[in-house]
Image: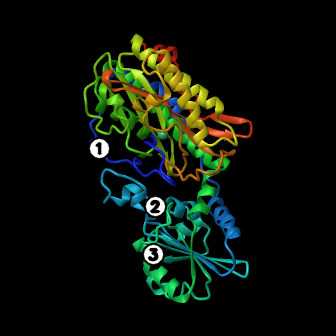
Amino acid sequence: MIYRKVLIGFCVSQLLLFTACSDKTTKEKPIEQEQIEKKEESVTVAEQKAALPDNFFLDNRMKLAEKIGNGSVLILYGKRNAEMTVVKNPDDQTKLGADRNFYYLTGIKDPEGIVVIRKEEDEIKETLYTSKDLKQSKEISKIQTIKEIQTFKKDQGNLLTESNVLYVDLGPLERTEIQIISELQNEANKKGIAIQNIYPVLTTFRMVKTVDEINMIRDAISVTNAGIKAMMKASITNKDEKDLEQVFRKELKERNIKRMSFDPIIGGGKNSTDIHYLHNDQPIKPDDIVVTDVGAEYDYYAADITRTFPSDGTFTDRQRQIYEIVLKAQEETIKAVRPGITLMDLEKTAKSALTEGLIQANIISEESQLRDYYPHMVSHHIGLDVHDVTDFELPLQPGNVISIEPGIYLINEQLGVRIEDNLLITEGGNEILSKDLIKTVEEIESFMKP
Ligand SMILES: [Mn+2]
């Protein structure tokens, strides 16, 4: 998944969630063989699945409690702000899941839920209102007071008593018109209670992943990698985008992964040049290049990986030439990834590497022409959202997880190449979390050999 361009604060243009598809599966023999080979790996993933520690959500709330003063009350809704995402069917709230900030603080995947955190004389009082099982919600969240969601209406009148500050989540923008909290805001205004946006605080927390969160992402990545390799193999005999998508979905299902972190992009030939291609329903020609930009989701934690490969397993000279340019730009950008660097620094590195490659290939003569061939951004944060919360002012720090995904799109030649890996920022630089997935021309050709 890629950022089309920078928006101040946040990019909302292309986050898409999993939508259901038909259950038609392919019957190609190479796929079955590949699945047998994968069985061992599949068992490993199932048995050693990463999990967040019992106190993860409690710890997050304790961290938050340190940031808010006495006399504060935070009210956070489980309803996901649909404006944050673009989905095929925006009315389908179930596909959105719970608001990720709500989940980060409670562990409860309940779009109906509401959590109230109050700080008085350095004491924290928490109440979770939920439509889920109360006992289970208590075990997961470690919140002592759990109530049925219906009781919230009754309690609402007393929420702001003796409060000086009301914290709500106004999202990335300082929007005041969010309907769902307008009643509380009105009341707060009447009582002279200050309203503060908790979003920037939670953003800085969420940008730094714990070891356990990173392991969740690692699992999502390893399943995604398996799915991409299966598509590469399948591509030799099956020249149809929708069949490749089915192969990918099947690999996820076999590893008990039910959702993708966004709608998959699987485009052959001219569709490889469409950076937001979602149809995945066209035949692929033997000489076509195929872009697969996909990600498994593991308990909301996202992977976001792109590989580009020749549909028949052998790059043409031109495909190889463009592929090498993008790969070199990706490697150079990855080399620059370390604490202290900003996403905009990485953008500059990627652009200058892509420019150099395209000038050498006589495709452009100066950097200003690059935009015609590279219309998106090279990096974004990854976490509970595939385009995770981001404070663009903050330089990278250990614990951040980002994508590096340069691309070149020659529309006239129906040739698009994008290569995307997910990286963890470490003290010394970075670790490529998706490093196990084959990437060089030689690796891909040798892997795809029937
Ligand atoms: Mn991406």
Q: Secondary structure at mark 2?
A: loop
Res. 305 in view:
yes
Question: Is the residue marked by circle 3 packed among few (<14), some (14-19), or many (20+) residues within 10 Å?
Answer: some
Question: Residue 261 location, x and y as percent?
Answer: 45, 46
The image shows residue 234, relative to residue 446, as above or below, that is: below
Provide the residue designation for mark 1.
21
Query: Disc 3 and disc 2: Cα gap in Å?
Result: 16 Å
**Separation of residues labelled 2 and 1 (CA atoms):** 22 Å
Which residue is disc 2 drawn over?
98
Quarter that holds the N terminus: top left
Classify mark 1: helix, strand or loop.
Answer: loop
Give the answer, above or below, for where 19 lies relative to 276: below
- Badge 2 density bin: few <14, some 14–19, many ≥20, Cα 10 Å: many
The x and y percentages for residue 402 are 57, 41
Please, what secondary structure does the residue beneath circle 3 have? helix
Picture quadrant where residue 401 is located: top right
Earlier residue among tags 2 and 1: 1
In the rendered image, residue 79, in percent from the top left (x then y), is placed at 43, 66
The earlier-in-sequence mark between 3 and 2 is 2
Query: Which of the 4 image quarters holds residue 252?
Result: top left
Nearer the viewer's eye, disc 3 or disc 2? Answer: 3
> In whole angstroms, how far apart are the C-alphas of marks 1 and 3?
35 Å
User: Residue 415 has which mark?
Assistant: none
Q: Amino acid at mark 1?
A: Cys
Q: Nearer the viewer, mark 2 or mark 1?
A: 2
Q: Quadrant of the C terminus?
A: top left
In which quarter of the view is residue 138 placed?
bottom right
Mark 3 Cβ inside 8 Å of ligand 1: no
Q: How many marks?
A: 3
Classify 339 as above or below 319: below
Given residues 392 and 157, the one toward you in this image is 392
Residue at label 3? 181
